[in-house]
Image (cartoon, helix red, strand yellow):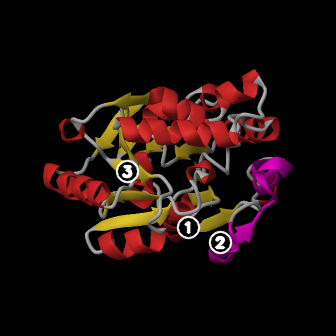
Amino acid sequence: MKIIFLDADGTLLHHEGFIPQSALQACQLAQRNGHKIVLCTGRQKVEVYGDMLKLDYDGMITGSGAHVEVNHQLLEERTFSKEQLHILLEYMHKNDIDAIFETTEGLVGNQKTYDHLDQMIQKQCKHLSPELFAKHGLVQVQHNLKVTDAILEYPVNKISFLESDISYQEIYDALHRQFDLVPATFAPFGKESGEISEKTITKATGMQSILNYFDKSAEDAIAIGDGFNDLCMFEVAKISVAMGNAPIEVQKKADRVTTSLDNNGIYNAFIVLGLIE
């Protein structure tokens, strides 16, 4: 039995909101063959909807490791401390950076962030049909965002900051000693966007919790992803696979590179790895 850890956006899920039929088929066949499928995403549990619910996952790691479930039962959950959250709120306010503060049960942000998302939607989604518009990730994020100024009152476990006049590198340099930062894997947030987590909360820690639950080791783990926040997954798993649409820097860190999401990447990887026939 292998435990297959799959990233969502850009790996299993297209940013327009669908999972390729070949990927669904591959996952279902692998489960019938006795393997475990674990969703391992930076998304919060509340953001796992639509096509992502077409699969019955054996485990789920959301919030980049903050929330871990096995067979729909909670295994562990972790959040920022109030002190950490206060530091980050002050930094965002001082530098005029709009951000989405994420909890397992929902997304919160101020009115300015909501308006920023609206501008992004108008720019990136106006050409889409009504059906595709409704499914687009930016539209879904804005729809799920609760507007509030009382962010300190929420159990935040991850922060996604939108592109601003401050570069990702500058934000990284200012915060990386205290927090874990990676470039955002959701492209519509902008090339200077990113994610902030508590240093002890990563996809890798979530993976280890799942492996421990099933009494398995890294030898039994396969990680498939396309983003910089998937590199920690690659370090844990015996076999790592980068999607063909992943940045070159990510592909270089993987043991194998499959085809792109649009070109049956998951299905082809499962065939090559002998998970399905």
Is 108 on the left-hand or right-hand side of 2? left
Which SS class for mark 1?
A: helix
Instruction: Pick whichever of labels 3 and 2 is earlier in the sequence.
Output: 3
Cα distance between the residues tagged 3 and 2: 26 Å
Q: Residues within 10 Å of mark 1 (few under 14, many from 20)?
A: many
Is 55 in front, or is 111? 111
Res. 13 visible in picture? no
Tag nearer the camera, 3 or 2: 3
50 relative to 176, above or below:
above
Give the image location of residue 60, x and y in percent. Answer: 48, 40
- Counting residues from the start of the chain, the first of labels 3 and 1 encountered is 3
Identify the mark at residue 265; answer none if there is no mark.
none
In the rendered image, the vertical position of residue 99 relative to residue 146, given as above or below: below
Looking at the picture, which amino acid does disc 3 mark? Ile
- Check disc 3 and report the residue beneath it: 159
Q: Look at mark 2 in the image and give the residue it sits on.
A: 254
Residue 63: in magenta span: no
Task: Specify the segment rendered in magenta.
Answer: 247-269
Give coordinates of residue 56: x percent, y percent: 59, 29
- Secondary structure category for the residue under label 3: strand
Amino acid type of disc 2? Ala
Q: Residue furthest left?
A: 83
Q: Earlier in the sequence, mark 2 or mark 1?
A: 1
Mark 2 touches mark 1? (CB < 8 Å): yes
- Tell me if mark 2 has few (under 14), some (14-19) or many (20+) residues whose alpha carbon lies within 10 angstroms of its own: many
